[in-house]
Image: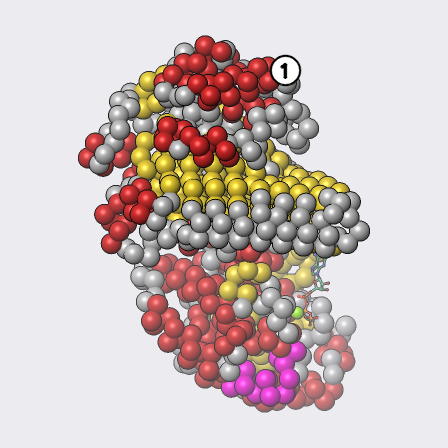
Amino acid sequence: MSNEVLEEQINSDYKYGFVTDIEADNAPKGLNEDIIRFISKKKNEPNWMLEYRLKAFRYWLTLDEPHWAHVSYPQPNFQDIIYYSAPKPKVQLNSLDEVDPELLKTFEKLGISIEEQKRLSGVESRIAVDIVMDSISVKTTFKETLLEKGIIFCSFGEAVQEHPELIKKYMSSVVPYTDNFYAALNSAVFTDGSFCYIPKGVRCPMELSTYFRINSSGTGQFERTLIIADEGSYVSYLEGCTAPMRDENQLHAAVVEIVTHKNAEVKYSTVQNWYPGDKNGKGGIFNFVTKRGICLEDNSKISWTQVETGSAVTWKYPSVILKGDNSVGEFYSVAVTNNYQQADTGTKMMHLGKNTRSTIISKGISAGFSNNSYRGLVRISKGATNARNFSQCDSLLMGDKCGAHTFPYIEIKDKTAVVEHEATTSKIGEDQLFYCKSRGIDNEKAIGLIVNGYCKEVLNKLPMEFAVEAQKLLAVSLEGSVG
Amino acid sequence: MLSIKNLHASIDGKEILKGVNLEVKAGEIHAIMGPNGSGKSTLSAVLAGREDYEVTEGSVTFNEKDLLELLPEDRAREGVFLAFQYPVEIPGVSNVNFLKIALNEIRAYKGLEPMEAKDFLVRLKEKQKLVELDGKLASRSVNEGFSGGEKKRNEIFQMAMLEPKLSILDETDSGLDIDALRIVAGGVNKLKSKDNAIIVITHYQRLLDYIVPDVVHILYNGKIVKSGPKELALELEEKGYDFIKEQVGA
Ligand SMILES: Nc1ncnc2c1ncn2[C@@H]1O[C@H](COP(=O)(O)OP(=O)(O)OP(=O)(O)O)[C@@H](O)[C@H]1O
Ligand SMILES: [Mg+2]
């Protein structure tokens, strides 16, 4: 395929780039202790939370922005960001009728139905949704149904008010504010997010999902998610995100923490589709996220599945600390970069317990002028006897102006460990494309088909509804990437 | 149906087809034979629209349309089918899904609705039986890990599913065991009708015992140097290509 054709055709459409015209309650731009007090006050937080924020903020001030990732971007001006923006009026919503119709329209456009009734009738596809727009959670569905089983699913802010003992116990226990630059920043200024607690022995009867949306201009989104699976419980949790198209870069710095107790399992799936910027690399979200789970007790399991197609720059390593014996960590990832997108993503598997096992399957797809890096750490600590890891990192290149990089780090401190690493790099096959075309399938569809086939191992891990969405997304993200 | 006139095609500046002429009518079976490297696969690739080849001279009309003007996918939608000499693997894409998409793309081109799932299944079962394709193969990824013979059988299965007007079978017989050859050839014969045409490219007379051609052509050094009735294949088998070389004075 010639480069001219390729260049000519690089243009992918982002269909979530609209802005909702909705009144917002904003904090003034900038970051200082007063802003943090402002946020805390707005959220009516107890003093201990404010203290935590301030501690994190003071620590953050001592840090420099990290530069080790294989990405380059202009440093965000942290004083030029609005740290709190809430759709007005912020009232407790008791029924859907009270939701601003503009908001409802927004979610319709995003293809999310927040109509509980509709969902209820279709017994199989029941998903409870928490919706976070800019800084606050606007609606959580199915709350009551879940509560009957003792499951708490609410916005983070609400959890601070109503379940302070759980927040105090678990928040920051997996990702301390000292963890890294963006975790510290998030701990200081986080606004909302989801909270989820599954009590002992309960299998959550539906998928729990949070939908994040950046709407206001000039704002950053700093959400926090905390999921706790108590003994013998199970939950599948989904996260989706989009943002309007803007010329400016907007910052998204989230922290997600997961804790699993004995015999518990959490499956966390993400379809990340923040606005990637235009085809010349202007605008787009900076997605700097810290996600980590801990298998705190024996026989527990945490599984991360991510499909990353959006954002201008992504910096993200969903990780698992395998503390309990026989615990299992999994990471399944598809990361697509097109045009001038940059992604440095991967995982860390920290084996501490005996007989712990981890699996890493990463599929990177690069097109256009983009750069796509896999960065992974497998650490087997002393005493983690019979730990096992299998990693497979595949890269697929479309065109010859993009880059794929793999940075696997392996640290083994225990002789009984077995660690396997496989990596491949391939180009999307002309032969495959021609074969598809010779059967009547056009270029775009053929690419979609081949790429989806290539990612199948990962897509298979997603819940049904999400998998379908992810497949479409992959095709759209790569539209016009091969001539 | 198909009319090839003075077709010249080259790849990377090297001329491979040097003036091919061929007329195929509906209901006919044509066999093309010729030594290795004579340009048989090149001819089929050019007909199917592989972009690596540059057509430097000549014309191809297919059912009144200028075939060379059409995109490869549109040629397929118009009814041209190529059974590949070397079928391609597409990991992670199931055969069934692949065919469903292909079939519906072809239908959409003709302004038809996607095929009902039920009808698709019926056709699937029927065609699977026709070429005696193992049900497991149908649900596996396209050609991935298939044996050589299984790949070839799968090509004919695809042909059966898509019901093309013109099928070009590029050495479909190579790699098939004796029983498979009989089964696959039998399938091809059942697919033959007065409305479609088949071009079989082969090195061996054996296949032509099953799929009996109306005409046999010999492609030599990028040109069709001799055409004749099916007995020509027998003569070739007996004498080898040397007699052709002598005749064309090479
Ligand atoms: N990229 C290329 N550059 C130069 N020559 C090429 C290229 N691709 C193919 N050829 C040549 O074109 C000629 C025709 O090849 P083709 O595959 O059409 O032969 P064939 O008749 O199908 O042979 P076989 O019976 O072995 O299948 C061969 O000599 C081959 O080496
Ligand atoms: Mg050949």
User: Is B209 situated above or below B39?
Assistant: below
Q: Is residue B249 visible?
A: yes
Q: Is residue A210 left or right of residue A398?
A: left
How far from the left and from the top, in percent, is residue A289? 54, 32
Tell me which residue sits at (64%, 51%) in the image.
A325
- In the picture as drawn, the residue positioned furthest to the front comes out as A165
Quick check: is B173 in the magenta stretch?
A: yes
How far from the left and from the top, in percent, is residue A276? 49, 33
Query: Is A22 in front, or is A32?
Result: A32
Quick check: is A237 in the magenta stretch?
A: no
Q: Is residue A109 visible?
A: no
- In the picture as drawn, the residue positioned furthest to the right comes out as A415
Tell me which residue sits at (52%, 75%) in the image.
B136
Q: Which residue is mark 1?
A: A62
Disc 1 under 8 Å from ligand 1? The reply is no
Marked residue chain, label 1: A
The residue stretch that appears in magenta: B172-186
User: Is B151 situated above or below A226?
Assistant: below
How far from the left and from the top, in percent, is residue A364? 60, 45
How far from the left and from the top, in percent, is residue A110? 35, 39
The type of residue carrying mark 1 is Thr
Q: Is residue B5 left or right of residue A120?
A: right
Tell me which residue sits at (44%, 70%) in the image.
B162
| Tag 1 secondary structure | loop
